[in-house]
Amino acid sequence: METFKLTSQVGADGKLKLEVSTHLSDQPVEVLVVIQPAAPMVAAYPPDYFARLDRIAADDLVERPDQG
C-alpha cells in the first residue's frame, strides 16, 4: 500500500484532477480519497507581537529577592 499526502487546487468547475504515478501496472487497485479544505496560512505571530511583548516586559519587571 502506498500513501500520498497532496495539496492541490480545485478548479472553477468544482473538479479536482489527480494523476498519480505508482509502481503498479495493469491491475485493479483500491483508491481512497479524503478531501478537506486546507487550513489558511497564518503568520506565527502578529506583526507587532514582539514590540508589544517588549513594552509589557518593561512595565512589569519581576524582582527576585536576595537568595543568600
Image: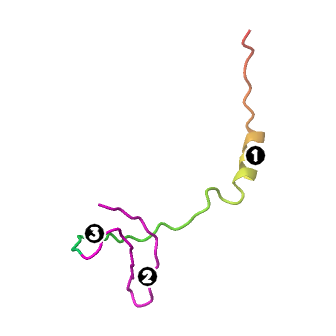
Residue 46 percent coordinates (x, y): 66, 59
Q: What stretch is highlighted in magenta?
A: 1-26
Q: Are marks 3 and 2 in contact (CB under 8 Å)?
A: no
Say if the magenta span includes residue 68. no
Residue 59 in which image quadrant: top right
- At x 46%, y 75%, the residue is 8
Residue under label 2, please give it. 10
- At x 39%, y 82%, the residue is 17
The residue at the far top in this view is: 68
Q: Nearer the viewer, residue 7 or 23?
A: 23
Residue under label 3, please give it. 32
The alpha-carbon separation of the residues under discs 3 and 2 comes to 18 Å
Q: In terms of secondary structure, where does tag 3 sit?
A: loop
* Quadrant that contains the N terminus: bottom left
Q: Which of 38 and 52 is in front in this view?
A: 38
Type of amino acid under label 1: Asp
Type of amino acid under label 2: Val
